[in-house]
Image (cartoon, rainbow, N blue to C red):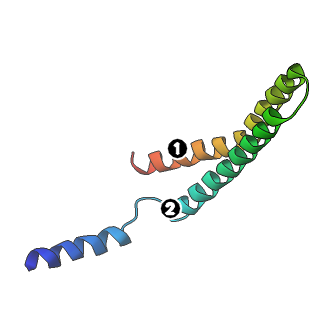
């Protein structure tokens, strides 16, 4: 039984002694949700282009533009994730 008590004390202590800022997890979740929304929208647009009727060259151009737009929309979120990763890494150095 003493082992259980010691284990509970360790758990309580670990919750109160956070190494990093408590706002990191909500920021991470928000960034990942935004990226998922962007990816889903791109996937849906890609499906619509591929299923559409029309000239294959035009479809290829639309797809190329879609991928470029997709990368442009993702870039600020990816940069923010990299910044967040650096903040977390700094907490452990």
Looking at marks 1 and 2 on the same chain, the residue that comes earlier in the sequence is marked by: 2
Q: Nearer the viewer, residue 72 or 15?
A: 72
**Under tag 1, what secondary structure?**
helix
Q: Is residue 91 left or right of residue 62?
A: left
The quarter holding residue 76 reads: top right
> Residue 78: x percent and y percent?
64, 42
> Residue 47: x percent and y percent?
76, 39
> Residue 63: x percent and y percent?
80, 29
User: Is 20 placed above or below 51 here?
Assistant: below
Looking at the image, which residue is at 61% across and 52% down? 32
Quarter of the figure with the C terminus:
top left
User: Is 41 placed above or below 75 here?
Assistant: below
Q: Is residue 24 left or right of residue 89?
A: right
Q: Which residue is mark 2?
A: 21
> Residue 56: x percent and y percent?
85, 21
Looking at the image, which residue is at 63% across and 58% down? 30
Looking at the image, which residue is at 11% across and 74% down? 3
Q: Which residue is mark 1?
A: 86
The quarter holding residue 4 reads: bottom left
> Residue 53's mark?
none
User: Is 47 placed above or below 37 here?
Assistant: above
The quarter holding residue 72 reads: top right
Looking at the image, which residue is at 45% across and 45% down? 89
Quarter of the figure with the N terminus:
bottom left
């Amino acid at each position: 039984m003493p082992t259980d008590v010691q284990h509970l004390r360790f758990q309580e202590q670990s919750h109160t002694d956070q190494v990093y800022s408590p706002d990191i997890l909500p920021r991470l979740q928000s960034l990942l949700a935004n990226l998922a929304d962007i990816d889903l929208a791109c996937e849906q647009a890609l499906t619509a282009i591929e299923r559409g009727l029309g000239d294959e060259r035009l479809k290829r151009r639309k797809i190329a533009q879609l991928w470029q737009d997709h990368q442009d929309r993702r870039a600020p979120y990816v940069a923010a994730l990299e910044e967040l990763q650096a903040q977390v890494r700094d907490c452990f150095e």
